[in-house]
Image (cartoon, grey):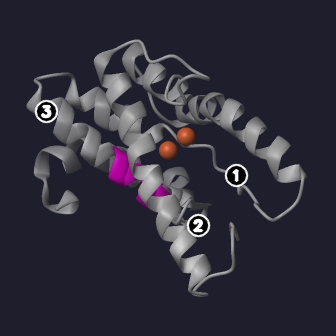
Amino acid sequence: MLYLDSKFMEVALPIIEHKEYQQMRYIKHHDESVFEHSMKVAYRAYQIAYKRNLDWKSTIRGALLHDFFLYKFKKCFSLRIITDSIKHTIVHPIIAFENAVKYFELNKKEENIIKGHMFPFGFPKSREAWIVSFVDKYIAVFEYSSNFKKMLFGKQPAFQSE
Ligand SMILES: [Fe+2]
Ligand SMILES: [Fe+2]
């Protein structure tokens, strides 16, 4: 359990308790909030990095901040969604990084974890950055499929982002 892991929480707490970071609880992403998504990515990436004796602290911090874009991304059935989605895909790692450096001090590895997580639109330069990029995509697939199931069974309007 993520919240019971003291090593993880010790590194994560200064970020997740921050007032600006808490805003991510109210921004929908895939099937849940950006906060929940980022916590899941950070925890899974941390478990992998820790097992491999890598820089798990930077992995947690970079992963927590990889989607720190702080804007609501509306999705609805229209042609605009294609251009908006492409724009968001390319630009949000840069926006996340710009927001992150306003509130937190980042090392070079954490910077690249954020900027490079949308491979092939960004390029991960460390094993930790590759782990976060991979875990992010892996978790996103489950979140999208859960969202799709809810759409099919009518528990939530299709592709509603707020
Ligand atoms: Fe992202
Ligand atoms: Fe993500």
- Which marked residue is nearer to the observer: mark 3 or mark 2? 3
Q: Residue at x 72, y 55 (%)?
A: 73
x then y, percent, for residue 46: 23, 38
Q: Amino acid at mark 2?
A: Tyr
Beta carbon at label 3 within 8 Å of ligand 2: no
Q: Determine crowd level at label 2: few under 14, some 14-19, many 20+ residues with C-alpha closer than 10 A.
A: some
63 or 84, which is in the foreground?
Answer: 84
40 above or below 53? below
Locate the N terminus by quadrant. bottom left
Which residue in the protein does label 3 denote?
50
The residue tagged with tag 2: helix, strand or loop? helix
Q: Amino acid at mark 3?
A: Tyr
x then y, percent, for residue 160: 70, 71
156 drawn magenta: no
Q: N-terminal of the two: label 3 or label 2?
A: 2
Q: Residue at x 56, y 22 (%)?
A: 120
The span from disc 1 to disc 2 (Cα, nearest Å) is 10 Å
Specify the label residue 26 is tagged with. Answer: 2
Q: N-terminal of the two: label 1 or label 3?
A: 3
86 or 103, which is in the foreground?
Answer: 86
- In which quadrant of the rendered view does residue 74 lie? bottom right
Q: Start and end of the magenta stretch? A: 35-41
Q: Amino acid at mark 1?
A: Tyr
Q: Determine crowd level at label 3: few under 14, some 14-19, many 20+ residues with C-alpha closer than 10 A.
A: some
The residue tagged with tag 3: helix, strand or loop? helix
Majority secondary structure of magenta residues: helix
Specify the label residue 157 is tagged with. Answer: none
Which residue in the protein does label 1 denote?
71
x then y, percent, for residue 64: 40, 43
Labels 3 & 2 near each other (Cβ < 8 A): no
